[in-house]
Structures are given as C-alpha cells and as structure tokens.
Amino acid sequence: MGFDLCDHTADIAVSATGDSLEAVFAAVADGLAAASCDGIPADAGDRFPLTVTAESREALLFDYLDELIYLRDVRAELPVDHRVESIAPPSTPDRSADGGGAAGDGSDEWQLDASARGVGLVEIDAREIKAVTYSEMRLEPVETDGNETGGWEAYVVFDV
C-alpha cells in the first residue's frame, strides 16, 4: 500500500491505497510531501502532533491536507513521515436522565489524530504546493468479493 504521483494538467495528483482509513490518509500525506520535494532527509526534524476535525470523512481528508500545507507555511518546515494514529467517526452523545447531554459528550464531527516530522525548508529544495482541491477528490472503500474489506483508496488533486 502507498501512493503514486500522477500528472494532472497544470496540477499534481496523488493516488493512494491503504489497508485502513488511517493508512490511506497517511499515504496521501506522504504523497503530498513527495510532490513537494525530490528527497527527504531520513533523520532531520522533530515529530509534532496534530488534530483535525471535520463534518465528513472527505472533508476530514481535505482539512488534514490543508492543515499540513498551512503548517508548512507557518513553521517553515515540510511535514513528512506521516503517522495517522486514529480517525474517529462522529459519536452519539451520552444523555443524562433529564434528556440533556453534558457539555463535551459525543461529537458530531470526524476527528483525526496524527503526527509528522517537520523538515526545515532550508534543508531541502522544496516546490510550493499551493492548495489541496476538492476537484476530482475520491475517498472510497475497496470492495473485494462484494465486501468492503479490501482497504481504502483515495485520489487528491493539488494546486501547484
């Protein structure tokens, strides 16, 4: 499982697969890093955590990639070596006996918890990826023998 960079008119696209939703998100993020530079130092940079929330699974992928681009610009570091620890779907809030829910119970949004390693832009020859787009974005389970047990695939176009 992993990613492929695909030519796309004036943009660049990443096609990725993974055994799990977490794996395919990390593979797309690794594809974003690969589209940004030709070589990534194996031991440079420190890991940092990030959390992203969104209203849908597809919006979560978009917002995660958008956050990585934002962090690159703000921190002057290219996020690489992506690890997506968890992706949690919306949950139903616990309800108290009076029918109300306590603040913070449940969530109506998807949540991603991840980490990446930041490599200083001065250490690499990086190309600018301007933005992630919804154009042609796909995030789908892979069906095998009529079951959704074959993992996930994603396709994302980036504006360069």
Image: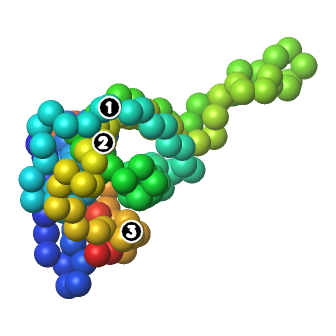
In terms of sequence position, does the residue under pointer 2 or pointer 3 come before the other?
A: 2
Residue 47 numbered tag: 1
Q: Disc 2 vs disc 3: which is toward the camera?
A: 2
Q: Is label 2 in a helix, a strand or a loop?
A: strand
Where is residue 43 shown, x and y percent of the image? 15, 33
Q: Is residue 56 left or right of residue 101?
A: left
Is residue 10 shown above or below 52? Answer: below
In terms of sequence position, does the residue under pointer 3 or pointer 1 come before the other?
A: 1
* Cα distance in 3D space between marks 3 and 1: 23 Å
Do the CB atoms of the residues marked 3 and 1 lie less than 8 Å apart?
no
* Cα distance in 3D space between marks 2 and 1: 6 Å
Question: In the image, what residue occupies the spot 38% across and 33% down?
Answer: 48
Identity of the residue furthest to the right in this view: 98
Is residue 62 shown above or below 83? Answer: below
Place residue 8 in its image quadrant.
Answer: bottom left
| Amino acid type, label 3 | Ala
Which part of the image, by quadrant, shows the C terminus? bottom left
Where is residue 31 shown, x and y percent of the image? 20, 55
| Amino acid type, label 1 | Arg
Question: Is residue 151 in sight in this rendering?
Answer: no
Q: Is residue 140 left or right of residue 41?
A: right
Disc 3 marks which residue?
131
Question: In the image, what residue occupies the spot 13% across and 63% down?
Answer: 5
Place residue 24 in its image quadrant.
Answer: top left
In terms of sequence position, does the residue under pointer 2 or pointer 1 come before the other?
A: 1
Residue 118 numbered tag: 2
